[in-house]
Image (cartoon, helix red, strand yellow):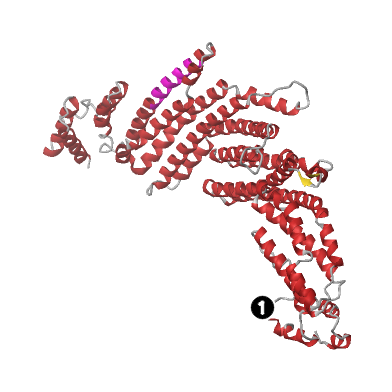
Amino acid sequence: MRDERLKKIWDQLRAREAQGPVIRFVQIRCQIGVFGLSFPDPRTPTLPLESIVRKRLSAAVDQRDHATILRFVRLYPPLGLEEEGLQAYVGYLKKVVSMRSRLEFDQLVELMEQSYSSSSVGNQGQVNFVACLTNLFKDIVLAIEENDGVLRSLCGEDGIVYAICELQEECDSRGSMILKKYMEYRSLAKLTSEINSYKSNLLSVGVEGPDPRDVELYLEEILQLTQLGEDYTEFMVSKIRSLTSVDPELGPRATKAFRSGNFSKVVQDITGYYVILEGFFMVENVRKAIKIDEHVLDSLTTSMVDDVFYVLQSCCRRSISTSNINSVIAVLSSAVSLLGSEYSEALQQKMREPNLGGKLFLGGVGVQKTGTEIATTLNNMDVSSEYALKLRHEIEEQCAEVFPAPADRERVKSCLSELGETSNSFKKALNVGMEHLVSTVTPRIRPVLDSVATISYELSEAEYADNEVNDPWVQRLLHAVETNVAWLQPVMTANNYDSFVHLVIDFIVKRLEVIMMQKRFSQLGGLQLDRDARALVSHFSSMTQRTVRDKFARLTQMATILNLEKVSEILDFWGENSGPMTWRLTPAEVRRVLSMRVDFKPEAISALKL
């Protein structure tokens, strides 16, 4: 077997037209094995082939002669020295990567020192930590990818895993140095300390925190650096997992090395700084958006709504891009807290002004400026509630892609539930504000409604015909609605205007039901009420996108009862005979409405079995 290996080596060397003492030595050894010859004196010292190959490889490594290194490292497997060959070759790859990364790092440090002595923006732009880290990762990845065949020839897929783990040491060493130098360059420890002091001294007069614009620049840099690290780690771990014939213990051990190595620990440190900076950036920009809030031309909301949610969306997206679940939870919690406190207070401030109703109508006419301000405030609440749900949905989708682990998803879900609660709180505030607005408008409609109490529904044919020409009250009521309600439609969101109209309808219907229950009706009076109810339904249906028929259902059913020829006819519409109609009146109310007909006998009504 030994002689066969030597013969194989000889063939390999001849195929490459190699020359020198190694070939001559192999040739002699092969001849000895083939012809059965032996040395006359076994004590005569010989030159081991292994030593020659080792020396030649070592010399080639020192000279960085890649072609010669490849030629000699391929001799290791036939000599039974696969693992030694793998160690030697990977050691050479580490030296190449180390030399290149050290050179780039030294240049980076030199540029840093130059930037300290110069305020030139151009010099600061040349200090590119992202490029330095990118090149380090690129060199490591290329060392694995381009030498895949050599590594496999030495120790199969185990050789690839070994190379990845060895080169990861260079990432842990040089990559950590790059990140630490970046943190030093941007003075992150000092900056975050200043931010924490600023947050605790907010009430102090004249205290100014760091410039959010600088902080945003640092955030983007940190994001790029951490994303690079995550992409590199994910690529390498996926590479290991894709290997099918490695030692079962090698894969998990290599994966753990990536997640618990020194580079990963420094990434955790810089991520800690990131959370503080992101929180500061978010708070400062939300406060600024609230402070400079203004009306926007052709917009139903003020500027702070879009501005605030843009800031929150940007910050949350950036936190997800770090692929760090703790960062996401911290930033998301800050966002929810901001919405529920300072932003919510700013939303409701306008509706808390005293005598808002008095300002809305002056001299009996709606004041456009005040109406627009009130409508815009309500719009802000409506859109904010919608935006909060959209933000929740977006974060949920993005996190599902980045964090597949059930435990991580559960943490995100728990935090997002608070965002849903925040949306509901905006809706509650909106409802309160809307009711406030309605309470300002309805007193201007009520006099027309109260006048309905004086209208008779005990009509003769002549009176019924006259009412068809000269409407007694419906058109006056609708005019009052148009005057006091419809003028706000152009300045309200569709959702808010619909809600506003429906609240006004609720007020009108409730008052009409009370008034009608106190009247007496002839059959023509019942027909008149049916005509009045249809006119109201028709008009209000044109004012809102939502259905209004259900609002007038009780009034319409009252008109149906009052329009009957005789008492017993109610049974044609009641119980099993009701068909698709759902009765909104109770049996007791039906009897009461029947009793309002002047020509229906009480005995017949009492005899009904409803």
User: Vertical placement of 483 versus 35: above or below?
Assistant: below
Q: Residue at x 70, y 84 (%)?
A: 577
Provide residue 24's location: percent of width, then percent of height.
15, 28
* Label 1: how many Cα within 10 Å (few below 14, some 14–19, many 20+): few
The residue identified by callout 1 is 580
Q: Amino acid at mark 1?
A: Pro
Q: Quadrant of residue 591?
A: bottom right
Determine whether 437 is above or below 73 in the image.
below
In the rendered view, would you say 203 is above or below 256?
A: above
491 on left or right of 432: left
| In the displayed structure image, the side of residue 336 where residue 245 appears, left or right | left
* Residue 161, placed above or below residue 210: below
Judged by its main secondary structure, the magenta piece is helix
Identity of the residue drawn at 71% across and 55% down: 499
Q: Quadrant of the C terminus?
A: bottom right
Residue toward you, 437 or 359:
359
Does any portion of residue 444 appear in the rendered image?
A: yes
Q: Residue at x 36, y 36 (%)?
A: 144
Most foreground residue, 160 or 588: 588
Q: Quadrant of residue 276?
A: top right
- The magenta stretch is 97-112
Where residue 575 sits: x, y (%)? 74, 83
Q: Quadrant of residue 151?
A: top left
Q: Residue furthest top?
A: 117
Q: Is residue 221 left or right of residue 598?
A: left
Magenta span contains residue 540: no
